[in-house]
Image: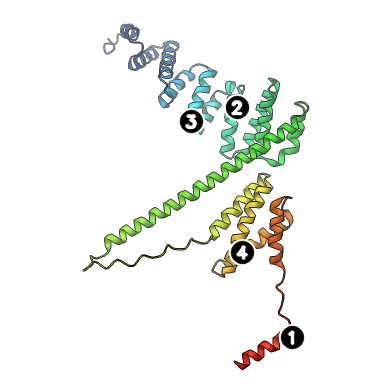
Amino acid sequence: MDSKGEGEKALEIRRKIVGLDSASEDARVKLAEILQREGKFDESVEQYAELAKLYESMGRRDLKLADMYEKVLSHREDKEMLRALCRIYDELGEKKKILKWMEQAKSMSATDPELLAMQARIYASLNQIETARSKYLMLADMEKNEGHIEGALSAFAEILALMPGEDEKIFRRAEELGEGSVDELKKIVEKRRRELAETEKIKEEEKKKAEEEKLMQEEAKKKEQTAAKAPPTAARPKAPPPKSPPPLEAPSMKDADSAADLGSAYVKMGLKDEGAAEFEKARKIYEAIAAAAGPDEARARQRLNLISSFLKGGQPKGKVEDKAKVEVKPKAEAKPEPPKEKEPEKKRKISFV
């Protein structure tokens, strides 16, 4: 019927097929397509919506379900469906698609706390801090107007975790939420900053591990290539005697720089105690490298002077400061010279020998 141009008759048959097998994906898609071609857009969208419900009942959370959501949202507003679409893309790491749909559906995303919070979080992850800040402020106002004090404080906490210099402005706004709100906000901020610091530390460790694995793979590949090119040996050599295990590698400049960089990240986040601990770790490694008098001695001493200055003057009060002062200050003192009266005696011995 369709090939003969009898669209209405073909449409009637398609409807009967779906009525006989409502769980058929193919039948619903073909019905939706012919409805759209015949200009019956509302009915076509309804078929895509029914297909989305079918996928949901099957427990699917993939791009096929997202495609059904997009077909529906392209023709009508549905806040719950927009949330579901953004959740799927969030799980799949499709940040740009989330922002695209939130921009297209501003009337819904700008008035929904869940969508606004997701939008702010994505901008923060993309390092668009100012945009993220404005979204979190909008979220805080929305939560405040709804009487959700905890939600407003959480939004303020995200701003302070991202931008420590905003403390005074945000605390003034938090005071409007009621007595004790500022103290509660400080607790949430401290917890959030620690979480961000731990996340940053994990990322650094994963990055370092990936680099080490890549280096090992490259070394293994080089050995295989070398072994393949090597000429065959005439006789099998005797196995060498077992060697003692190689000594553990001493800490390197890379380890020291990593600790120093992590210390700087902690300080920028307002975690001075954690920063001091990392600086102390870096200081010990730089001292060992400087004492070894190797090729990295000059650079190690330069970095050591910078870190020692911080530990002497910029270290917050606590155990780390005491430890740093005990270990660093004696290092700066001049070594006692041997008694002058013994010098002639030492020269006479040398002359005698």
Image side of residue 255 versus residue 243, left or right: right
Q: Nearer the viewer, mark 3 or mark 1?
A: 1
Of residue 54 and residue 40, the one placed in the foreground of this image is: 54
User: Vertical placement of 189 versus 293: above or below?
Assistant: above
- Tell me which label, 3 or 2, sits earlier in the chain: 3
Q: Which numbered marker is on residue 341? A: 1
Q: Nearer the viewer, residue 203 or 119?
A: 203
Residue 97: x and y, percent? 49, 30
CB-based contact (under 8 Å), mark 4 and mark 2:
no
- Quick one: label 2 or label 1, which is nearer the N terminus? 2
Asked whether residue 352 appears in the rendered view, the answer is yes
Amino acid on which the number 2 mark rests in the picture: Leu
Please name the residue that numbered disc 4 is placed on.
287
Q: In the figure, residue 117 lies in which quadrant?
A: top right
Does the residue at mark 4 contact the one at mark 1 (Cβ under 8 Å)?
no
Sooner in the amino-acid sequence: mark 4 or mark 2: 2
Q: Is residue 310 visible?
A: no
